[in-house]
Amino acid sequence: MTYVSVVTLAAYGLVLLVLGAIAVVDLRERRVPNLLSGALAALWLLWRVVLGFAGQHMGLGFRAEFAAPAPTIVVPPGLSIEGASLAEGIIGAVILGGGLLVLTAVYEAVTHRESFGGGDIKLMAALGLFLGAERGLICLLAACVLSLLYALIARIARSVIARRRGGTSEEEGEGLLRTTLPFAPFIALGALIAFVV
């Protein structure tokens, strides 16, 4: 494994660690800390700079490796993580962060109901830097599907519990619809899926 591959694997590992910390905070406090989302963006920039210096050391030039796609990493059991280029990362951040912001604003204006929080939007923008647009959209889609499955299972479980207690399942179901769902844990799972798809 080359030096650049080791650095890239370490960067991806740190991304997953920070995502784990964000998920725990979101579960406990229902918020995504700006400091941790900002740390992901700073990690991405530091990682790109290290790739640039590695390229310069190997005679390829700083600018070439700084902007080039990160190396593909193969992890057991034969899964590969393809790296995004500098441009793909920036486009991913703009599409995921900006697109999610626009969709959220439109949804909230039309329905007058809360959608994604600002922390989730910033987190998706930071992840877009690492994943690029295509895998970033896979991350978002996986997070949405997983969160919907969780909400559905939770609603069914509450309905069953309410019936056993003699309450109405409609009241329990409506209560679930009014509660907020921490989305960062699902984003973290989506990112894990997107890294290896």
Image (tube, grey):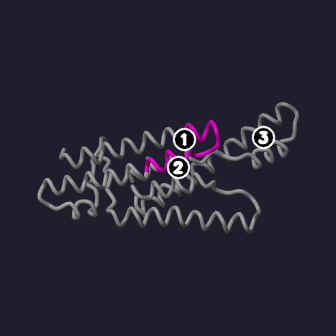
Q: Which mark is first along the chain, 2 or 3? A: 3
Q: Nearer the viewer, mark 3 or mark 1?
A: 1
Label 2: how many residues lie within 10 Å, few (<14), some (14-19) or many (20+)?
A: many
Q: Give percent across and percent down for residue 143.
A: 54, 51
Q: Nearer the viewer, mark 1 or mark 2?
A: 1
Residue 135 badge: none
Give yes or no for contact between labels 3 and 1 (Cβ–Cβ under 8 Å).
Answer: no
Q: Nearer the viewer, residue 81 or 117?
A: 117
Q: Secondary structure at mark 1?
A: helix
Q: Give percent across and percent down for residue 34.
A: 54, 48
Q: Which residue is pictured at 39% across the width and 55% down the height? A: 130
The answer to whether 72 is drawn above or below residue 92 in the figure is above
Q: Which residue is pictured at 64% across the width and 39% down the height? A: 29
Q: Give percent across and percent down for residue 187.
A: 52, 49
Q: Which mark is first along the chain, 1 or 3? A: 1
Q: Give percent across and percent down for residue 161.
A: 78, 34
Q: What's under tag 3, amino acid-wise?
A: Ser
Residue located beneath label 1 in the image: 23
Residue located beneath label 2 in the image: 187
Q: Which mark is first along the chain, 2 or 1? A: 1
Q: Is residue 89 magenta?
A: no
Q: What's under tag 1, amino acid-wise?
A: Ala
Q: What is the residue that sits farthest to the left in this orientation?
A: 59
Q: Is residue 103 left or right of residue 193?
A: right
Q: Give the magenta part as a residue range.
A: 22-40
Q: Is residue 99 left or right of residue 82?
A: right
Residue located beneath label 3 in the image: 159
Q: Main secondary structure of the magenta part?
A: helix
Give yes or no for contact between labels 1 and 2 (Cβ–Cβ under 8 Å).
Answer: yes
Residue 169 location, quadrant? top right
Q: Quadrant of the N terminus?
A: top left
